[in-house]
Image (tube, rainbow, N blue to C red):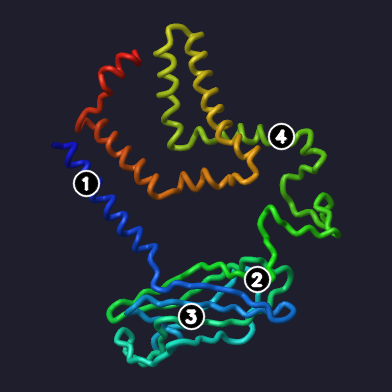
């Protein structure tokens, strides 16, 4: 009975988590963005928005209500706006019940155009941030949206397609920008050893973290009490450490030989919300078993083969 109650609670939690996750991912406005080249470094950004049925977007600033309309900002400081943005579409003025004032809104499909000046190389994908406010008859929801704008004639700025400037020698910088201080010649001889020693020292420092330090006496006592002799205990501990090392080496091997493999894959897997929810559920089930609420035992046949 206890086990059925626990799984029922976990099922309810997963349903609530799924509903919340969908609510956080939902947006009132769907955007499409393109950048058209005019002349020189001049571009025209065109944003096409589609508003969910029954909702509207506050298109113009409203000082009385404290609304700033639709805001566009760029993460790159080399991009400058030219003039004011233009909003076109089903614009209408309504008596807003939320703020109690006359407000200009847009619904359905609409476009926002903004002219900009870009100094230097123009990326193929220009990153921008949109800030705007949405509402229906009873709800008011501010939204923040990160978008990638496809720029006409832009250059791919990814790591594999960097622009090389012949007049710049990376091995001989004009000014000392700091860093490790290891030159190209030094890194060829002692760089790997330095990285190894730094990694080893970092591992020793990690031993004093709250999640690792309490496990040290538990791990030591496991090998000392399980071994018949001191020699066997040392061998078991060495074998244990070797396989930890081997696991990390095997995980990193594909990234040395497969150019298309992204190192962010492991980070994406470890931060995946659904995977973390599954681990959370497993840990809760085992924790309640450790507290004595119920007992989890292996099948007798499997236990016999293990012994």
Q: Secondary structure at mark 2?
A: loop
Specify whether 10 is left or right of 152: left
Task: Describe the element under mark 4 as helix, strand or loop.
Answer: helix
How many angstroms separate mark 4 from mark 2 (CA)?
36 Å
Query: First in sequence: mark 4 or mark 1?
Result: 1
x and y percentages locating residue 122 in the rendered image: 69, 69
Q: Residue at x 62, y 86 (%)?
A: 83
Question: Which of the image's four quarters has the C terminus?
Answer: top left
Mark 3 vs mark 1, CA separation in Å: 43 Å
Q: Residue at x 44, y 72 (%)?
A: 30
Mark 2–mark 1 distance (CA, rounded to whole Å): 50 Å
- In x, y percent, where is residue 119? 72, 73
Residue 260 in the image: above or below residue 35: above
Nearer the observer: mark 3 or 4; the answer is 3
For mark 2, what is the residue?
A: 77
Q: Which mark is residue 192?
A: 4
Taking the image as shown, residue 174 lies to the left or right of residue 66, namely: right
Mark 1, residue position: 9
Q: Residue at x 42, y 72 (%)?
A: 143
When the figure is inspected, residue 66 is found, relative to residue 102, above or below; the finding is above
User: Residue 107: x percent and y percent?
Assistant: 40, 83
**Cα distance between the residues tagged 3 and 2:** 20 Å
The 10 Å Cα crowd at callout 3, few under 14, some 14 to 19, many 20 or more, is: some
What quarter of the picture does the N terminus occupy?
top left
- SS of the residue at dot 1? helix
What is the CA distance from the residue labelled 3 to the residue labelled 4? 51 Å
Front-lying residue, 264 or 37: 37
Name the one closer to the observer, 264 or 176: 264
Tell me the residue that label 3 is attached to.
Answer: 70
Q: Earlier in the sequence, mark 4 or mark 2?
A: 2
């Amino acid at each position: 009975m206890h086990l059925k109650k626990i799984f029922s609670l976990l099922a309810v939690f997963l349903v609530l988590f799924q509903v919340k996750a969908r609510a956080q991912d939902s947006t009132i406005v769907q955007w499409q963005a393109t950048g058209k080249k005019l002349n020189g470094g001049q571009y025209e950004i065109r944003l096409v928005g589609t508003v969910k049925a029954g909702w509207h977007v506050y298109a113009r600033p409203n000082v009385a209500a404290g609304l700033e309309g639709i805001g566009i900002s760029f993460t790159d400081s080399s991009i400058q706006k030219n003039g004011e943005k233009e909003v076109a579409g089903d614009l209408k003025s309504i008596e807003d019940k939320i703020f109690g004032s006359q407000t200009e809104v847009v619904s359905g499909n609409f476009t926002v155009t903004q002219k900009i000046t870009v100094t230097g190389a123009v990326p193929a994908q220009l990153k921008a941030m949109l800030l705007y406010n949405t509402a229906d008859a009873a709800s008011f929801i501010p939204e923040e949206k990160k978008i990638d704008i496809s720029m006409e004639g832009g250059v791919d700025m990814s790591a594999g397609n960097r622009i090389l400037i012949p007049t710049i020698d990376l091995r001989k910088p004009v000014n000392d920008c700091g860093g490790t201080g290891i030159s190209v010649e030094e890194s060829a001889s002692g760089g790997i050893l330095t990285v190894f020693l730094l990694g080893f020292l970092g591992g020793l420092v990690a031993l004093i973290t709250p999640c690792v330090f309490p496990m040290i006496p538990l791990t030591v006592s496991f090998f000392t009490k399980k071994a018949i002799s001191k020699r066997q205990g040392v061998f078991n501990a060495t074998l244990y450490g070797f396989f930890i090392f081997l696991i990390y080496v095997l995980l990193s091997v594909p990234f040395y030989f497969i150019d298309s493999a992204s190192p962010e894959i492991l980070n994406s897997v470890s931060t995946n919300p659904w995977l973390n929810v599954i681990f959370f559920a497993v840990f809760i089930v085992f924790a309640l078993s450790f507290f004595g609420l119920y007992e989890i035992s292996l099948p007798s046949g499997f236990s016999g083969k293990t012994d």
